[in-house]
Image: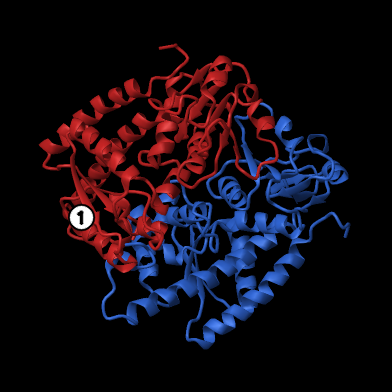
Chain colours: A red, B blue
């Protein structure tokens, strides 16, 4: 593979080696990480992700259980189901698979997941902790994208970075993660008057919009790094369906110094970050348990969830 | 006063009128907002702020109680004190006055304040909620600065904004608040190679660094808005001590379309936002209480704090 094309699969494999070792240590200490995938209705695209997560979890030695709930489930029943998983000591982390039926409030459900079991890093408290530079556990895709940038060896301090896309779980967390590392960060989105004005002066461009061909080579500064988070199903000239990112790979790869392919770039690293979050969550539950039982009296304010 | 100079005191007075009415409504419903100011040691600069907060609270009809703790207090004792205030039904909001002695972990203490009593908007969950665009309650200074920008009537969608300073409680929250409104946001800081390159193309410059004279007129695009959050004590040519912001007022006011003075700009609005947060916190505690007592059974996941 071309040197400038970043191999996400190899990076993920390296992560999983370390994660498996951490899982072994936890098991020796009596803690068995287990992920629960909660899927509502019969969603084809989610099923593919779930199979993949299950396969990688098993590689890492993490148990993976699937919970399927009927499409007709109410919000209150979902809340009760999540409360049950929060209270289940065998569950280390809860994954709410998207998309969810429109009648459910996904944000409210994410908030119902206990912060110590929030392996997707989407609870407001998890997001807030990232703002406060506690960056061990965060939204998987954002963490993966930043980790890939770091793997280039570029020095992040003072680096000019442009993030296209301002979603709560990808664009914004990428911005805080990079600010914490000393980068100068501009966040653009669909309301930005002229995205190219920004990308042309950037050392690094992250793109997470979900629009094939959004970033083209002429929008880049020569030698820039392009981290492509988009996943788009398109039909090529021969009528074959294929998956591409948000960057036009052909033109961008001619100008960029580094570029992530889609598939095989950010995606596999994201799944490995989910597994690392599972380990981190289990370690935190262990620490919480130990602090609860190693003192006779713990003032309420000292619990790790801040209550 | 020059039309381009934004009058923060007048803006704050307008806010307080609305807040007082909200306080009246709460009182009629049996809820009496009360702020507790927690000060550790004898800190001269904090004492000034506290007096000011107390005066404004009383104007708004909000009770204000001062708690002074000895400089020798330990972290565990502070945690216990906060736990006590969390559990005290007469306390609607807790203010941890800074600076705190170096042996105390201010971040951990802020996290110990219950999210429903976090009137300073500094709990990670409060910060995370802002990222998720729940913007009723947030860090007072950031909220005040953005509110002042809105008062200019500038349309935020697509506006090019540069924020200088990336602190957790000012610079970063300003960035998310503006992103939520559709602005294109760049965050610069002490590691940014060339701040002027960014500010010269900006429609709005926020500066929150704490360095007098950091932004000068030649760094601005003509007609830009300057929102100055710095507070610096300096000695003028006549040897008199005075308070100035981070922007050089003389040169900036000649180029800018709008500028906030220091003092009399963001400061008074910040205190009014603290009072509004006290009202919001009390309203949330009321809603929480009502939801607890209006059902026979509430699943754990449905409580407003997400636990």
- Check disc 1 and report its element: helix, strand or loop: helix
Closest to the observer, A275 or A301 = A275
Q: How many marks?
A: 1
Residue furthest to the bottom in view is B28
> Where does the image place residue B40, in percent across and percent down from the top left?
47, 58
Q: Is residue B59 above or below residue B104?
A: below
Give residue B191's quadrant in the image.
top right
* Chain for disc number 1: A
Residue B221: tell me if it is visible.
yes
> Where does the image place residue A246, in percent across and percent down from the top left?
52, 32
Closest to the observer, A169 or B231 = A169
Closest to the observer, A198 or B205 = A198
Left or right: residue B219 versus residue A57 is right
Residue furthest to the front in view is A238
Give residue A13's quadrant in the image.
top left
Q: Quadrant of the N terminus of chain B?
A: bottom right
Residue A229: tell me if it is visible.
no
Residue furthest to the top in view is A2
> Where does the image place residue A186, in percent across and percent down from the top left?
61, 36
Left or right: residue B145 versus residue A215 is right
The residue at 34%/45% (across/down) is A120
Give residue A70's quadrant in the image.
bottom left
Q: Which residue is mark 1?
A: A292
Q: Is residue B291 above or below residue A84?
A: below
> Where does the image place residue B85, in percent across and percent down from the top left?
40, 69
């Amino acid at each position: 593979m071309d040197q400038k094309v970043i191999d996400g699969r190899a990076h993920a494999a390296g992560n999983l080696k370390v994660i498996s070792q951490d899982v072994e240590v936890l098991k020796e200490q009596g803690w068995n990480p287990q992920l629960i995938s909660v899927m509502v209705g019969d969603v084809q695209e989610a099923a593919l992700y779930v199979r993949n997560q299950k396969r990688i979890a098993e590689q890492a030695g993490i148990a993976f259980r699937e919970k399927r709930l009927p499409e007709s489930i109410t919000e209150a029943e979902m809340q009760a189901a999540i409360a049950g998983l929060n209270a289940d000591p065998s569950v280390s982390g809860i994954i709410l698979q998207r998309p969810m039926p429109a009648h459910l409030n996904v944000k409210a459900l994410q908030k119902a997941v206990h912060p110590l079991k929030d392996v997707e890093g989407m609870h407001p408290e998890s997001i807030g902790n990232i703002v406060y530079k506690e960056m061990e556990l965060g939204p998987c895709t954002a963490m993966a994208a930043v980790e890939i940038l770091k793997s280039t060896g570029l020095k992040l301090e003072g680096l000019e970075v442009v993030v296209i896309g301002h979603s709560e779980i990808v664009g914004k967390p990428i911005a805080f993660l990079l600010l914490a590392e000393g980068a100068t960060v501009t966040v653009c989105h669909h309301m930005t008057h002229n995205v190219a004005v920004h990308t042309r002066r950037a050392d690094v461009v992250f793109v997470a919009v979900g629009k094939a061909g959004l970033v083209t080579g002429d929008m880049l500064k020569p030698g820039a790094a392009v981290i492509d988070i988009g996943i788009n199903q398109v039909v090529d000239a021969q009528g074959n369906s294929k998956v591409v990112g948000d960057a036009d790979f052909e033109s961008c790869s001619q100008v960029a110094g580094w570029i992530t392919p889609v598939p095989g770039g950010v995606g596999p690293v994201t799944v490995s970050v989910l597994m690392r979050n599972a380990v981190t969550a289990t370690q935190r539950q262990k620490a919480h348990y130990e602090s609860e039982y190693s003192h006779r009296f713990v003032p309420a304010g000292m619990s790790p969830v801040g209550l």
